[in-house]
Amino acid sequence: MLLSLLMLIPLVGSIVVFSLPRGKDALAKQVALIFALVTLGVALYLTVGMDNTNGGLQFLEKHDWIPAFGISWTLGVDGISVVLIAMTAILVPLGMIAGWWDAEDAGRGTVKGYFALILALEVFMIGVFVANDLFLFYVFFEAMLLPVYFLIGRFGGPQRAYAAMKFLLYSLVGGLFMLASLVGLYVVSGRELGKGTFDFEALTALHMDPATQKMLFLGFFFAFAVKAPMVPFHTWLPDAAAEATPGTSTLLVGVLDKVGTFGMLHFLLPIFPEASKYYTPVIIALAVISIFYGALLAIGQTDLMRLIAFTSISHFGFIVMGIFAMTTQGISGSAFYMVNHGFSTGALFLVAGFLVSRRGSKRIADFGGVNKVAPVMTGVFLLAGLSSLALPGMSSFVSEFLVLVGTFSVYQTAAVISTFGIVFAAIYILWLYQRMMTGVPSAEVSSTVKEINRRELLAVVPILAIIIALGLLPQVALKIINPAVAQVQTYVGVSDPTSEVPTSMPGSGS
Amino acid sequence: MIAALIGLPLAGATALLLGGRRTNAWGHFLAVALSASSFFVGLGLLIQMMGRPAEERAVSQQLFQWITVGTFQVPFGLHLDQLSIAFVMLITGVGTLIHIYSIGYMAHDENRRRFFAYLNLFVAAMLLLVLADSYLLIYVGWEGVGLASYLLISFYQHKPSAATAGKKAFIVNRVGDAGLAIAIMLMFTTFGTVTFTGVDAGAGQASAQHLTWMGLALLLAACGKSAQFPLQSWLLDAMEGPTPVSALIHAATMVTAGVYLIVRAHAIFDLSETARTAVVAIGAITLLLGAFIGTAKDDIKKGLAGSTMSQIGYMVLAAGLGPVGYVFAIFHLLTHGMFKAGLFLGAGSVMHGMHDDVNMRHYGALRTMMKITYVTFGLGFLAIIGIPPFAGFWSKDEIIHAAFGQNTFVGAAALLGAGVTAFYMTRMMAMTFFGEARWQDDVHPHESPAVMTIPMMVLAFGSVFGGMAMLFLGDIEGWLEPVTGFAQPANAISNTILIPITLVTVLLGAGYAWLRYGRRPVPVTAPAQVSILTRAARADAYGDALNEAVFMRPGQYLTRSLTWFDTKGIDGAIGGLAAAIGGISARARRLQNGYTRSYALTMLGGATLIAFVLLLVRL
């Protein structure tokens, strides 16, 4: 019941906030924040309550939904989904606090609408991470689009309608392919089991012939690659992230995009092990391209929000690479990377949002010398940036290195090339910092850019604290993630390569 | 106790950064106190260590399990042995002196608190670098000092040149960092572990090819951090930072981390001749390149920076010689840490008296106005050019000797380097302290306050006696041998012949410089009609021009064309499609008054169609 409850709380919250009378904006915000915090409490309770000796699904719930089609309300979490849920539940209230005034002057939306939509989005985001019936997953996957569509289309910047439509169409096309594969999978399972099913665990036990696997794999992969997004299916993201409010961008890039990589890890590998292995070379190549393409494009941007969006495309390249390396370090690293990326990109978007709302412009060239007028803001921005470039001491370093070392043990060339991605990360972050923060502030900057305030600090300081704490003590998250990674490897039937020189270290060979 | 070494300065950095303006008044005293306490803890540990027999001197402290993912297991563990304690004393000792000096040097800077916070942060990160017991933890310190260096180089943030220099240092360093990361990955797949003990134990069983690649990747890392060819270009620009920073980070400690890394990984280099040869070659090239650049610089700090490159080239060369050189690499590193820090502080003191002018052509005759600076700088000068019995003589002579044992060319390069060093350092002495006064208007040179001159005197004392103390009292060879191994160099030329040859070379270099710059007047503006060589040296041997032509311009072009391609190419193609669909759905929206339905309909219609086709194909 706990997982249903986890979705029920924000759902009720969303309805309550939406039903509040017009004009009670302050009340709507407070109620929304309370519901988000209660959800966070339950999510943390869930995370702490995980049995870390068990890599399978926990907190299972199973109820028939549409028995005629083998569709059920099957919820469950493993170590990977539970840390992503925790990340989501943390980012939602912090995003609300950061964007406390973002909906005030929006053209078409109301304040209560904005906060109700965010809670609705949280329902579906948790839904995709807990659904273990593929049809149910698909429903949440598509349902997630609606709140985002409205969040961008109603509360975004000047190009919001274009960006929202672009986002919707990309996702729809991806979703169509997934639906086709889903139906195919149902047919195949029916043929093999006598009765079609969408149940995740039942589907992992199927023995599909390789040709069928490959075809069905592609449908899912396309949907996930658009969502993640990987080059060349990425062009919706910069527009969406640039037009959305910073709070929405945080959830869009920090959480929503993870559904793509989460889907690859949680569904593709276990259900289509042979196809996954078959396509690995192509996907690793795409991942390496994404790393450098995203980084170079980030360097070339003149718009702050678009720049951050492109850095994410680079980061998603790392995540996908680690997943398809299929080693313990690669997969664990990727799962941890998803969490860390949510926090570091979230922090960047939020601080960038503070700056943009002050200066009234997203153009990087309109800033400069901010350090002089807002040193604390600058420091916070630098910390978020350093996390993005995976500085050791920050959690993102641990995950990026795990991905690299996990990939290196099976695909040396790809890992060595990707390692030089860290040089580009330094360029896009430090050059951005130089252009915005150093130098002598212009008259406009001096008069508009004020120091970060208490509410804003309340929103970003917890994120930065988590980033540093997890950098020092990554085991807090890794010990939850690791058992689930072993389970994925069992599904796929892979094991780690052994080292050239045999080790006598305790615990080796596990 | 080992953790306290790092913890004290880290606490200082945290307190000053989080404490904000409240700590403005006393923050710098806290920073000095914490750096000094770290020094005294280190001194206590050194005395304890000396009391134990050689094989029991190394101690470890496991703090907690840092990362465990499958067989990739990295403890957060510290390792204090004869090699790391030498660095601890250098870092905290010189570090504390420079903290004290900075009280005077930064007295009028509005961001003094932040400066001291970064200095403390640097000391903590550098101590982590030398105390880590695994290569991955070294990496944390490695990039940690890189961050501190970045923050301090670009400390004068209002100056675009400073911001650019800091960024450049970090980015060039990251190329080296990638090398370290690759070495660590290769260690993991080869040995299944990245701890020193595991790597040292397994090295003998690893394939030669893997050892060589590991060695080369570590060398790339060392080139980045230690400003060795071809990653040297950032160091000269790094002189944009405040002078105490140049002394501590970009002369005495951080830039020598590459040498530490190579010596620490000696188990790998011992077994790979190819990797060692590459190390020697890089060291020899850089020692000549740096000295060459140093001959034509009029900026006193850039002259010293070229000299630092060159001196680290000596250390790298020595480290590449294997067991005959490791000890001398570290010995020279320690003596260099003292005399070069002293020289930089002297340069800072001169600048302090000259309105922050760094152009030596505007100096001259300062020996009468700044007596303490003149004497301390002079003693550092005697140490660096290798006049007996000053510190640099002992360490540099051993390296030249070992280099001749390896190969005559390498030995000749080291010898030539000594002559050029004498030339550029004498030129610096002559232009700064001798000759006629060429001061600009409204400059009134004066000696610096005691808070600055006392650290200079302490370092000058080290420049005089440090070499002898370490060699004769400390028995540096016997002290380091249990960690690095030690072998007597094969005697191609005995020291009794080599020392006079070296001294004659040094005196020739110094004498020539004295004739050109001491005896003749120095023009206030640099002559424009100069040889190709002088022009090359002034332009840092075209390192930046090369980087710009090979990496930056093609990179900018690639970025610009990709940005264009992304919006016009990929997005244009898909956008065209999207626009078509968008047009249709817009019409659908008008018809149906709500996008939800049009969305659901489109989706269902399309999906049914595709599913249907799929079923047909399968049937």
Image (spheres, coloured by chain):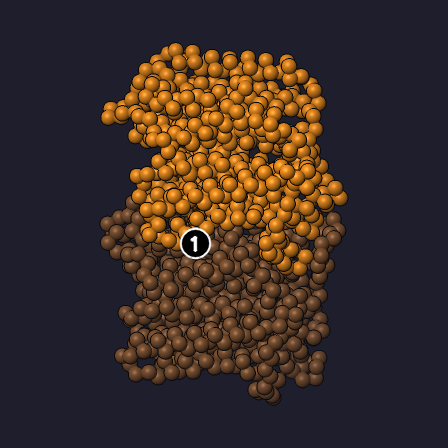
Chain colours: A brown, B orange
- The quarter of the rendered structure image containing the C terminus of chain B is bottom right
Percent of width and height locating residue B182: 61, 46
Mark 1: which secondary structure? helix
Chain to which mark 1 belongs: A
Percent of width and height locating residue A472: 53, 56
Q: Nearer the viewer, residue B52 or B274?
A: B52
Tell me if residue A43 can be seen: yes
Taking the image as shown, residue A434 lies to the left or right of residue B7, namely left
Q: Residue at x 69, y 43 (%)?
A: B200
* A357 is higher (above) or lower (below) than B618: above
Q: Nearer the viewer, residue B300 or A296?
A: B300
* A346 is higher (above) or lower (below) than B105: below
* B333 is higher (above) or lower (below) than B558: above
Dot 1 surroundings within 10 Å: few (below 14), some, or many (20 or more)? many
* A306 is higher (above) or lower (below) than B145: below
Percent of width and height locating residue B422: 49, 19
> Which residue matches tag 1?
A383
Q: Nearer the viewer, residue B227 or A458?
A: A458
Tell me if residue A291 can be seen: no
Q: Residue at x 52, y 46 (%)?
A: B5
Q: Residue at x 55, y 12 (%)?
A: B504
Taking the image as shown, residue B340 lies to the left or right of residue B413, namely left
Q: Across the whole image, how many numbered discs are drawn on residues?
A: 1
Taking the image as shown, residue A346 lies to the left or right of residue A214, namely left
Task: Single out the residue that lies furthest toward the bottom.
Answer: A68
**What's the residue type where badge 1 is placed?**
Leu
Q: Residue at x 43, y 24 (%)?
A: B376
Percent of width and height locating residue A503: 73, 52
